[in-house]
Image (cartoon, helix red, strand yellow):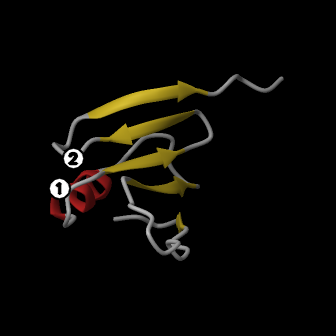
Amino acid sequence: MHKGLIVNRGGVPPGATVVAGNHSHVLSDVPEDSDVFYVLTRKPPMSEFVGTQTAIYEVKADGAIRVVEKMKKRK
């Protein structure tokens, strides 16, 4: 599955509600099957944002993937 994955699972402040997760890919420019699996098996269901060098994606709680933002190409 993932060969390089950076996950930040810092503490959640008391009284806060988590509505989505996020992580970055360093070896891939698109969400992978494991990203969708992770979202579909998460309890409670919530989206995961996946950052790559080329875009930010949202894997929704139903497994659908959408592009949130494309990154500008560097010269």
Residue 42 in the image: above or below residue 25: below
Question: Around disc 2, counting alpha carbons within 10 Å, would you say few (fewer than 14), some (14 to 19), or many (20 or more)?
Answer: some
Q: Is residue 18 left or right of residue 40?
A: right
For the point 55% across and 68% down, which residue is it?
Answer: 8
Q: Which residue is mark 1?
A: 40
Q: Quadrant of residue 45?
A: bottom left
Q: Quadrant of the C terminus?
A: top right
Q: Earlier in the sequence, mark 2 or mark 1?
A: 1
Residue 68: x %, y % from top left: 46, 29
Q: Is residue 12 left or right of residue 35?
A: right
Q: Amino acid at mark 1?
A: Leu
Q: Which residue is mark 2?
A: 61
Q: Nearer the viewer, residue 37 or 49?
A: 49
Residue 58: x %, y % from top left: 38, 39
Residue 61: x %, y % from top left: 21, 47
Residue 6 in the image: above or below residue 35: below
Q: Quadrant of residue 1?
A: bottom left
Provide the secondary structure element on which disc 2 rests. Answer: loop
